[in-house]
Amino acid sequence: MTEVQCDSTADRVLQYMKRMAMERGIADLASSELAEYLTENDPLKYVREQFHYPKCGTLPNVDRTLCDPESDAIYMCGNSLGLMPKATEKIMKEQLDKWAKMGVFGHTNGDLPWVSCDLCAVEGVSKLVGAKPVEVALCNGLTVNIHVLLTAFYKPTETRYKILLESRAFPSDHYAIESQIRLHGRTVEDSMVCLTPRKGEEVLRTEDILSYIEKHGEEISVIFLPGIQYFTGQLFDIHTITAAGKRKGCFVGWDLAHAFANVPLQLHYWDVDFACWCSYKYGCTGAGGLAGLFVHERFLVQNTPI
């Protein structure tokens, strides 16, 4: 059951490629001919035209004798910073003009009143993460939101005080969790559990995560894992792991920095307790773009302080 999410997704992609190759009479799935055919028949290819692509001639460390300086670069850095949407410049200019012409009154006037500007994006973001709009807030940066959420959900007791994460978690996640543990007067050595892959393997097996939760769940206050591991690209089975943690009485949260706007998410249906993400990667909001957080609506009914 553990590998179903990842394997079924990979299998669907493979079957699609085989079908397309068969239609074209192409034997080699790794051929440039198939790649070009898939590109030409991609129903979403029009989206490419909605973004600015850096030109080879404007990038540093490029040997301009090996490429056309006016050609688009092959951009594979969306995991760090997404491309700029072409609509951005017009939208930003409108707001800068409003600032120049209206000053403080821009907070509450115009097409995009600044005081509530986050609300215009909540509905769309909610669809991306599979949540109800009331469960989503756009604010702060990712690490700040990790602190906000752990402040609400990490309530260690004498018997349930550990935070479970993976050994290769993004460094700032590690630092935030260490800080939260120390803020509660506990030691990192005692309260932070880092899961590691099996010897000789690069990714965590879901069955190993589930086994640890089953054996030690009564000691765990919060499970906090990435939706996608930033270094290996491993897609975690959020639904299955969340269910396992909740059966043992743990709060289960997810860092979706590399999953947001990248893979399908159903946070409400999966019964996730909380999650957070940044938006400047696959969300393409630009450096400094607002981060987001999710808290399941049941906590709103319970009036959980956050």
Image (cartoon, helix red, strand yellow):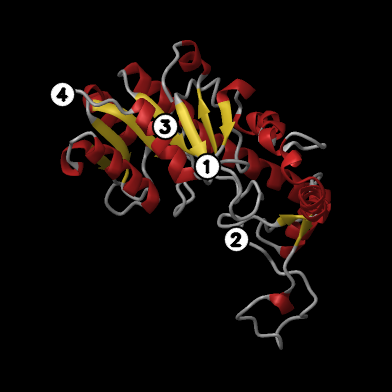
SS state under label 2: loop
Query: Which image quadrant: the C terminus?
Result: top left
Disc number lying in front (2 or 3): 3
- Figure check: 103 above or below 293: below
Q: Residue at x 37, y 19 (%)?
A: 246
Disc number lying in front (1 or 3): 1
Q: Nearer the viewer, residue 119 or 101?
A: 101
The Cα atoms of the two marked residues, 1 and 3, are separated by 12 Å
The Cα atoms of the two marked residues, 3 and 4, are separated by 21 Å
Sequence-earlier tag: 4 or 2? 2
Disc number lying in front (1 or 4): 1
The Cα atoms of the two marked residues, 1 and 4, are separated by 32 Å
Sequence-earlier tag: 1 or 3? 1
Sequence-earlier tag: 1 or 4? 1
Residue 263 location, x and y as percent? 60, 39
Q: Residues within 10 Å of mark 2 (few under 14, many from 20)?
A: few
The disc placed on residue 149 is 3
Q: Nearer the viewer, residue 202 or 229?
A: 229
Q: Verify CB contact (< 8 Å) between mark 2 and mark 3.
A: no
Q: Residue at x 62, y 78 (%)?
A: 60
The Cα atoms of the two marked residues, 4 and 2, are separated by 44 Å
Q: Verify CB contact (< 8 Å) between mark 3 and mark 4.
A: no
The disc placed on residue 158 is 4
Sequence-earlier tag: 1 or 2? 2
Q: Residues within 10 Å of mark 3 (few under 14, many from 20)?
A: many
The disc placed on residue 140 is 1
Sequence-earlier tag: 2 or 3? 2
- Figure check: 33 above or below 260: below
